[in-house]
Image (tube, rainbow, N blue to C red):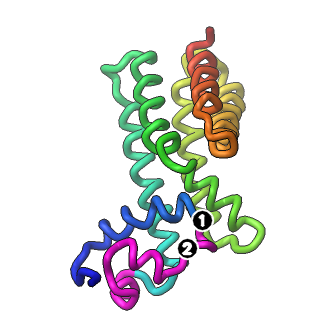
Amino acid sequence: MPKSKTSKKEVISKVIPILRLRGINNSSMSELAKACGIQKSHFYYYFNNKEALVKEVLASIHSYFKYNFFKIIENRTLSIQDKIKKINFLIDTMFKNADGCIMANTALETAHLNPTYQDEIKHFFTDFILGLSVLLQPNYSEEETLVLAEQIVQDLEGGILLMRIYDDHKYVNNAMKRMEKIILNS
């Protein structure tokens, strides 16, 4: 029997793995409600529809990433090597131990059909690129930092995709090693 009380935050945290694994189109509201242990009608107490749910999920992931990413970048007590280690751990936590990057998965799944989620996905990747640009500033010109930051994000996302296709973390690990080499300019 489904439980009757659960918080919005709990609901979001329980649907993230399902949406990450199955995608938006292959996840029904009934299935998501069941995974949360609540009635489908209770789901609509928090979210008017699946679009509203997915927007909240993406905003939640973006907020978590942005907070933790910039907390690392702005920490003046950490060396650049320590920042890279912590960023690698954040990437591991968010992307390697799951079924990829939910932002990229959602973008790939919906970009040509439904631009509803595009703004949140853009904000996520913009913050990712801007944060990496900050780390690159000591060793590169302003123009180079943006190009290199974009390249790192593209490389990591490609690594995540190949990790999923081949079920092998080496692709993300190699992208993270290249990121470190570029940031350290070595």
Residue position for label 2: 27
* Residue 138 on image: x %, y %: 55, 17
Q: Quadrant of residue 40?
A: bottom left
The CA span between labels 1 and 2 is 6 Å
Is the residue marked by circle 1 packed among few (<14), some (14-19), or many (20+) residues within 10 Å? some
Residue sitting at the far top:
186
- Tell me if I can see residue 149 in this picture: no
Image x and y of residue 24, in percent: 59, 70
Q: Residue at x 61, y 16 (%)?
A: 181
Q: Quadrant of the N terminus?
A: bottom left
Residue at (45%, 55%) from the top-left corner? 61
Residue type, mark 2 in image: Ser
- In the rendered image, residue 34 lying in the magenta stretch gets the answer yes
Answer with left or right where residue 96 lies relative to residue 33: right
Q: Secondary structure at mark 2?
A: loop
In the rendered view, would you say 135 is above or below 79? below
Going 62% across and 61% down the picture, which residue do you hit?
A: 106
Q: Magenta-highlighted stretch: main secondary structure?
A: helix
Q: Is residue 152 magenta-colored?
A: no
Q: Which residues are magenta?
A: 23-46
| Image location (x, y in percent) of residue 6 | 25, 75
Q: Amino acid at mark 1?
A: Gly
Q: Residue at x 39, y 78 (%)?
A: 34
Q: Are marks 1 and 2 in contact (CB under 8 Å)?
A: yes
Please give the residue where the numbered disc 1 appears in the rendered image. Answer: 23
**Within 10 Å of the Cα at label 2, are there few (<14), some (14-19), or many (20+) other Cα atoms?**
some
